Image: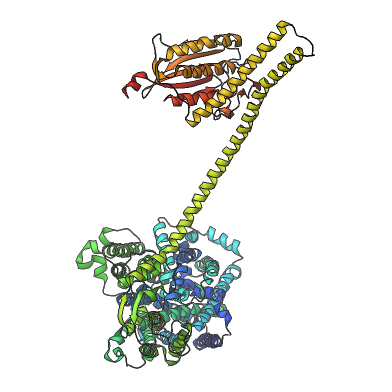
């Protein structure tokens, strides 16, 4: 046990040190010599205001009762900050451009700078934060009591009057400290570097003190991690520390959601994360450093809880294990360090929360009331900045007073985690209007109001009322019987939903009511022009256009009136500086800028940094004239803010198209390369075909020429044979040239083919007879399997016979002499035959088949190309011909209204299909 006077002295010296640190920091910031305050490290440490006495004391208590559930409180903010670019970056960007002062100001500005929304959010924030502030008072009081008297750790002195209650004096001390700390100036846009520095320092202190207790539990009271783990594993009563209870998932999801939302929507978190942010780039550092801080402070929760449950007697307040564990081992010095850490956790929360709430109260509750009074409503009224500063100080006293009353009213015996989660659920009601407002352009003021009211009512009914009833408030009948005695309206089993965890139940109904009301009412209502303008600016905040608001709002006012208004709120010196700087931006040499709409908007933003967006708009509207929103300018803004998105999407589309085009070009290039190779092969083949007969003709002609002159004489038989060869090679050369000319005429459409009524069966028989000699010479059996009757078609008989002869010739020539059946390794007869297939769509089908080796896979797609090779690649032997037969045949069939295609090929043979126009169908056409 430590003397009370000594504990008070140490606590007072520590708070004095914090005040001195804040004072020196602000002095150095004004001189421009405190660059460290703008560092990402200080910013990240200030975010650790999230770790309040609930985290410092209550996390150990939560682990002792519910095991690993405490981790969700750390995982929620971790998820939010890891994905900082999704939401946090947008919130910071908007707040900087709009001079936002609080979460109430942010939501109000999004929905047309609505005074009703800002007032509602302020009231909800106060009510939702009171239990949390009460939690800090309870933690400080309880820790002080246990430190000065270890035997009466739970004694609160509640029955001896208010003045004998430690919590009362803690409240008075905290109120005085916060007033001195955070209300030395009015301007919220000037930020609070002293507060940020003090909170960052406290974050270091609470981490080090908590780690000191954790290390003592691990190595002072246990023999390291392994020894403590063995003790926990061997003790069945401690199994819940490392296991999950049955059906834990709903509560885990609920607490994880609440912790993530609280990292944004708690007034104090919005203050340090968004309002106090001096550089958007600091978020990138906080995205990993803040989760690291949370991980470090969570490492020692389970060890302290395990040692407390092992060494301390049953019934001990588990929320105070951080103090009672070192006290039980006689380490009052370590307990005092832990007390200072808990004091840091509580005071940092109270300072920032009270500061944020007081700004909201003065800007959104007090300022609107002042503006309605006769004195302050007059344009000639004096400066009321002093009145607002007084309102903030009184607000701090009122907030802490309400926190003390809640602490007294609930007897101060509720678990810290339970109180904290109730507050989290309360501020979570801001989430739909906040998040929806920065991503959904159709969200309206009426929708936001409906959602906020519905969510707040359900929160109060399903979560706050049962908590107050447990504390002894006269609400037992409501909780047990429901509103009006209706069982379906019981707060703990609303609409018959029984068996759920009370937190999950309350969160489900409040968030469902909030979201449904927000969406449905927004869809059913239309936004005002100013709402549409703000919607465009918020939703597209990451692609803003310069001067958009100034162009859209068409207002007029005199420079004199604007300056007098600025003086009333900002003071003479600050107003002079603002107007002088703006005049220089306009290129004017005097200190009075031209009173154009951009100046009016600029003055309004400066006022908003002191009194909030809604009150600033109300003040400016009293002196301006003809306030309208230019429809053309609004449309232009909407177009401009969407242009970046459209451009981005267009670029993505173009990128995909370019990728597809590049793929197509690569494929086309491959095809062209293949065709170029085929062309080279074709030219080589044609030149070879031309050169062979030309060589023969030239050689034999030279022999005959020499014989007629002075050369050796030839007998008549030799001369006749040579002339026959010259004639045959000349015919071959003529046929090749005819084929080349033929396919050229076909492709150019110059060929004229007759369309006579023909018997296709007779032409096929003639073609088979023509090829019988070649078939016998090649050892191929040639057959025709057609009906005895005629097959009437339309076409050109000579051309049709040319096609049939070419197909039969190919079937005969490309039979490989060594072909065997793949099923049995025995020779098979070599055959080629013609048969009829099923005709469709007025076409007759003839099939030219063989049982040859088939067409090589590499040639299947090339056989109808005039550049294709005319030899069997598999056999490697030249088979004769120019390689133009199949291309010419297909051209002929297409000109006759039919077609020629390869139907099947493989080791069992090939089948070519010829389609001819049926004579009857042709006549009907």
Looking at the rendered image, the quarter that the C terminus falls into is top left
| Residue 84 on image: x %, y % | 49, 66
Viewer-nearest residue: 507 or 918? 918
* 199 vs 533: above or below: below
* 639 vs 125: above or below: above
Q: Quadrant of residue 675?
A: top right
Left or right of 692, for residue 353: left
Left or right of 317, for residue 721: right
Q: Residue at x 70, y 21 (%)?
A: 695
Number of disc labels: 0
* 58 vs 716: above or below: below
| Residue 523 on image: x %, y % | 29, 62
| Residue 160 on image: x %, y % | 36, 86
Q: Residue at x 58, y 15 (%)?
A: 824
Viewer-nearest residue: 911 or 401? 911
| Residue 736 on image: x %, y % | 59, 22
Outermost front residue: 709
């Amino acid at each position: 046990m430590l003397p009370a006077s000594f504990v008070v002295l140490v606590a007072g010296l520590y708070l004095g040190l914090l005040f001195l640190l804040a004072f020196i920091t602000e002095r150095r910031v004004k001189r421009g010599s405190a660059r460290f305050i703008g560092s990402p490290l200080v910013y990240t440490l200030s975010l650790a205001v999230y770790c309040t006495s609930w985290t410092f004391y209550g996390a150990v208590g939560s682990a002792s009762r519910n095991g690993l559930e405490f981790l969700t409180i750390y995982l929620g903010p971790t998820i939010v900050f890891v994905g900082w670019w999704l939401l946090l970056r947008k919130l910071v960007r908007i707040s900087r451009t709009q001079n936002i002062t609080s979460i109430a100001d942010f939501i109000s500005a999004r929905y047309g700078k609505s005074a009703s929304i800002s007032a509602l959010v302020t009231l909800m924030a106060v009510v939702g934060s009171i239990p949390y502030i009460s939690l800090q008072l309870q933690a400080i009081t309880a820790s002080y009591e246990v430190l000065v008297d270890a035997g009466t750790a739970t004694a609160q002195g509640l029955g001896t009057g208010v003045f004998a209650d430690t919590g009362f004096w803690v409240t008075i001390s905290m109120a005085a400290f916060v007033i001195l700390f955070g209300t030395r100036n009015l301007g919220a846009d000037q930020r609070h570097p002293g507060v940020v520095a003090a909170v960052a320092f406290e974050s270091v202190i609470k981490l080090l003190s908590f780690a000191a207790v954790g290390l003592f539990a691990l190595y002072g009271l246990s023999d390291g991690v392994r020894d403590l783990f063995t003790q926990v594993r061997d003790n069945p009563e401690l199994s819940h520390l490392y296991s999950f209870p049955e059906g834990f998932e709903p509560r885990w999801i609920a607490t994880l959601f609440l912790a993530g939302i609280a990292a944004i929507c708690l007034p104090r978190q919005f203050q340090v994360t968004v309002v106090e942010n001096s550089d958007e780039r600091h978020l990138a550092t906080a995205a990993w450093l803040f989760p690291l801080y949370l991980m470090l402070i969570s490492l020692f929760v389970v060890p302290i809880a395990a040692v407390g449950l092992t060494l301390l007697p049953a019934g001990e307040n588990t929320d105070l294990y951080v103090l009672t564990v070192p006290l039980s081992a006689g380490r009052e010095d370590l307990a005092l360090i832990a007390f200072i850490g808990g004091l840091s956790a509580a005071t940092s929360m109270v300072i920032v929360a009270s500061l944020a709430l007081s700004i909201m109260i003065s800007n959104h509750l007090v300022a609107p009331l002042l503006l309605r009074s006769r004195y302050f409503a007059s344009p000639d009224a004096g400066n009321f900045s002093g009145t607002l500063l007084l309102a903030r100080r009184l607000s701090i006293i009122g907030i802490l007073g309400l926190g003390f009353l809640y602490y007294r009213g609930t007897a101060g015996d509720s678990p810290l985690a339970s109180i904290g989660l109730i507050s989290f659920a309360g501020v979570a009601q801001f989430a739909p209007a906040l998040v929806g407002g920065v991503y959904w352009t159709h969200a309206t003021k009426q929708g936001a109001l409906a959602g906020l009211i519905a969510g707040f009512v359900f929160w109060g009914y399903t979560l706050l009322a049962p908590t107050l009833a447990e504390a002894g408030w006269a609400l037992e009948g409501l909780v047990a019987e429901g509103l009006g005695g209706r069982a379906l309206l019981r707060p703990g089993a609303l609409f018959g939903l029984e068996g759920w965890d009370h937190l999950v139940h309350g969160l489900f109904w409040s968030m469902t009511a909030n979201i449904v009301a927000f969406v449905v009412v927004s869809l059913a209502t239309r936004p005002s022009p100013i709402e549409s303008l703000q919607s465009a600016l918020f939703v597209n905040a990451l692609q803003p256009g310069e001067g958009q608001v100034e162009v859209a709002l068409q207002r007029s006012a005199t420079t004199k009136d604007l300056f007098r208004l600025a003086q009333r709120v900002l003071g003479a010196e600050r107003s002079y500086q603002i107007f002088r700087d703006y005049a220089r931006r306009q290129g004017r040499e005097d200190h009075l800028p031209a009173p154009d709409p951009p100046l009016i908007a600029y003055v309004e933003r400066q006022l908003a940094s002191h009194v909030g967006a809604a009150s600033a708009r109300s003040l400016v509207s009293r002196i301006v004239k003809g306030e309208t929103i230019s429809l053309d300018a609004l449309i232009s803004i909407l177009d401009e803010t969407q242009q970046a998105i459209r451009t981005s999407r267009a670029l993505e589309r173009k990128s995909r198209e370019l990728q597809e085009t590049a793929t197509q070009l690569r494929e086309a290039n491959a095809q062209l390369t293949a065709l170029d190779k085929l062309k080279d092969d074709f030219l080589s083949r044609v030149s070879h075909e031309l050169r062979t007969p030309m060589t023969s003709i030239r050689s034999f002609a030279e022999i005959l020429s020499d014989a007629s002159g002075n050369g050796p004489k030839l007998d008549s038989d030799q001369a006749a044979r040579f002339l026959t060869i010259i004639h045959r090679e000349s015919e071959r050369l003529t046929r090749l040239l005819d084929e080349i000319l033929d396919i050229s005429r076909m492709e150019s459409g110059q060929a004229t083919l007759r369309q006579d009524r023909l018997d296709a069966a007779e032409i096929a028989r003639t073609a088979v007879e023509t090829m019988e000699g070649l078939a016998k010479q090649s050892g191929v059996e040639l057959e025709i399997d057609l009906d005895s009757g005629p097959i009437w078609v339309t076409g050109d008989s000579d051309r049709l016979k040319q096609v049939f002869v070419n197909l039969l010739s190919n079937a005969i020539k490309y039979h490989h002499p060594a072909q065997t059946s793949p099923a049995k390794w025995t020779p098979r007869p070599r055959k080629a035959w013609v048969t009829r297939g099923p005709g469709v769509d007025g076409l007759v089908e003839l099939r030219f088949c063989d049982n040859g080796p088939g067409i090589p896979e590499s040639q299947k797609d090339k056989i109808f190309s005039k550049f294709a090779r005319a030899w069997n690649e598999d056999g490697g032997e030249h088979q004769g011909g120019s390689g133009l037969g199949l291309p010419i045949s297909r051209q002929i069939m297409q000109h006759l209204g039919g077609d020629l295609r390869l139907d099947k090929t493989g080791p069992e043979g090939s089948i070519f299909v010829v389609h001819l126009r049926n004579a009857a169908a042709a006549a009907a056409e």
